[in-house]
């Protein structure tokens, strides 16, 4: 084992040449994911929090040390992970730890509980108990979703990571059909469509419980997807969420896309179903930035840069990637800022997007965007 620090936490992690060979999983590349999650908790102030798939415990321990959460649960099915979680709880919270029947408990200012169970079993036992549940699995979160929607309170928040980008981005379409009941899209829009397929699948699971979903913040970064979803209680809320479901059509020859809000696609060639609603709540992002500016976080600078792109990003589905657009239409690539200023002169909004450094989101129709690129040749 080696001792490391991340945020306010100090933990032991297994020594291994490659992270996936280690008996308990710890990925330093996910520090930014955990930093952003700490900020989300600081904005939301949930009292009861579950880190359902804890591995070393780093996430739950950071939530306990760096947020106002009062009762934090950590859980992992792997007995080696559970042993390590206990060891890590001891370093961070002293020896005041009681152990019985596969449960460890720290009782201090905050209550911290660690269990060694199947996450689905634990969540089934804790019905409508948590204000905030975090799912951070290997690959897809879908196998945990039903019990998560039952164990989170009806106005609670769900935080979901998905690292199975190959299915969601269309490299393994059959796996996407199985896991997400959705037809994925390849090409330059695949990361945004992957994120929207993930959210869309969660919405379809949620509405059967008469719950709706409000997307507080969802993003793609470093080969994973992450979504913070606020549940809305009531059948009407479910109906509202379903109105934001639909399909995307994509022309590989030109890069032209079209969206359709509908329960079923009206014509051939549709990709989805997927979520077509907002990927952020502007006020929520602004609050996160406010908190981040005052915070001490391991990846603070990187995080502030990332959040500033998110803040300015237009909250509309899909974008034009100028490398792809130029290639598909046999044109030369031009500077994004030049394209944006012409679009602005024509009365259209445009912004950068975190999905691609070479793309813009705009309310201009495809024909105008293409015409603008042609004008700049
Ligand atoms: N949240 C951790 C972090 O931020 O470092 C990483 C979690 S790791 C990606 C996923 C963990 O889920 C593994 O430690 C694995 O043992 C655990 N796991 C897999 N299936 C599980 C199940 N059915 N119930 C509980 N834990 C499970």
Image (cartoon, rainbow, N blue to C red):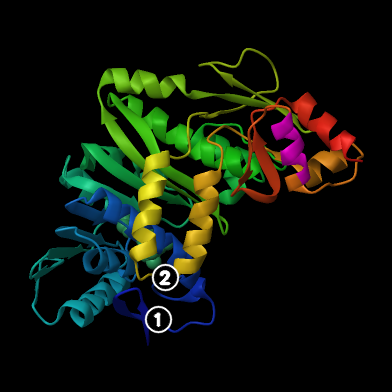
Q: Does any atom of ligand 1 lie closer than 8 Å to the CB of label 2?
A: yes
On whether residue 342 falls in the magenta region, the answer is yes
Query: Image point 49% across, 39% down: which residue?
Result: 198
Kindly identify which numbered label has been placed on residue 98. none
CA gap, disc 1 to disc 2? 8 Å
Question: Whereabouts is ligand 1, in terms of quadrant?
Answer: bottom left
Query: Quick one: SS at disc 2?
Result: loop
User: Is residue 16 rendered to the left or right of residue 334?
Assistant: left
Q: Residue 126: where, in percent of width, then height? A: 16, 46
Q: Nearer the viewer, residue 209 or 222?
A: 222
Q: Which residues are magenta?
A: 338-345
Foreground residue, 66 or 102?
66
Query: On the picture, is 249 further left or further right than 221?
Result: right
User: Which SS class for mark 1?
Assistant: loop
**How many residues crowd around disc 2 within 10 Å: few (fewer than 14), some, or many (20 or more)?**
some
Residue located 47% across and 72% down the image: 28
Task: Work out which residue is located at the far bottom of the displayed protein and give it.
Answer: 2
Horizontal side, residue 237 vs residue 130: left or right: right
Residue 265, image x, y percentages: 60, 16
Q: Which residue carries the number 1 mark?
A: 14
Q: Tell me where residue 119 appears, x and y as whole percent.
A: 28, 53
């Amino acid at each position: 084992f080696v001792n490391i620090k991340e945020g306010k936490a100090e933990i032991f992690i297994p020594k291994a040449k490659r992270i996936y060979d280690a008996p308990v999983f710890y990925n330093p590349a996910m520090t930014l994911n955990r930093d952003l999650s700490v900020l989300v908790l600081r904005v939301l102030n949930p009292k009861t929090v579950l880190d359902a798939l804890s591995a070393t415990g780093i996430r739950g321990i950071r939530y306990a040390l760096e947020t106002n959460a009062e009762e934090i649960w950590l859980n992992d099915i792997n007995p080696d992970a559970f042993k390590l979680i206990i060891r890590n709880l001891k370093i961070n919270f002293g020896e005041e730890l009681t152990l019985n029947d596969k449960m460890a408990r720290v009782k201090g200012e905050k209550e911290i509980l660690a269990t060694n169970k199947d996450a689905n079993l634990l969540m089934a036992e804790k019905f409508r108990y948590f204000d905030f549940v975090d799912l951070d699995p290997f690959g897809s979160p879908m196998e945990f979703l039903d019990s998560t929607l039952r164990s989170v309170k009806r106005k609670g928040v769900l935080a979901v990571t998905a690292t199975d980008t190959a299915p969601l981005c269309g490299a393994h379409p059959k796996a996407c059909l199985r896991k997400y009941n959705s037809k994925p899209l390849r090409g330059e829009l695949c990361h945004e469509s992957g994120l929207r397929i993930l959210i869309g699948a969660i919405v379809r699971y949620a509405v059967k419980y008469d719950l709706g979903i409000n997307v507080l913040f969802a993003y793609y970064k470093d080969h994973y997807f992450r979504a913070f979803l606020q549940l809305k209680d009531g059948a009407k809320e479910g109906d509202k969420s379903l109105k934001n479901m639909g399909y995307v059509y994509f022309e590989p020859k030109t890069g032209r896309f079209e969206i359709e809000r509908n329960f079923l696609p009206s014509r051939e060639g549709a990709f989805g179903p997927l979520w077509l609603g907002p990927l952020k709540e502007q006020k929520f992002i602004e609050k996160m930035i406010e908190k981040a500016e005052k915070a001490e976080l391991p990846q603070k600078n990187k995080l502030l840069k990332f959040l500033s792109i998110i803040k300015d990003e237009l909250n509309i589905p899909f974008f034009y990637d100028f490398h792809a657009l130029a290639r598909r239409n046999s044109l030369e690539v031009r500077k994004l800022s030049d394209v944006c200023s012409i679009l602005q002169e024509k009365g259209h909004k445009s912004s950068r997007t975190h999905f691609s450094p070479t793309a813009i989101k705009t309310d201009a129709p495809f024909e105008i965007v293409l015409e603008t690129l042609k004008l700049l040749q």
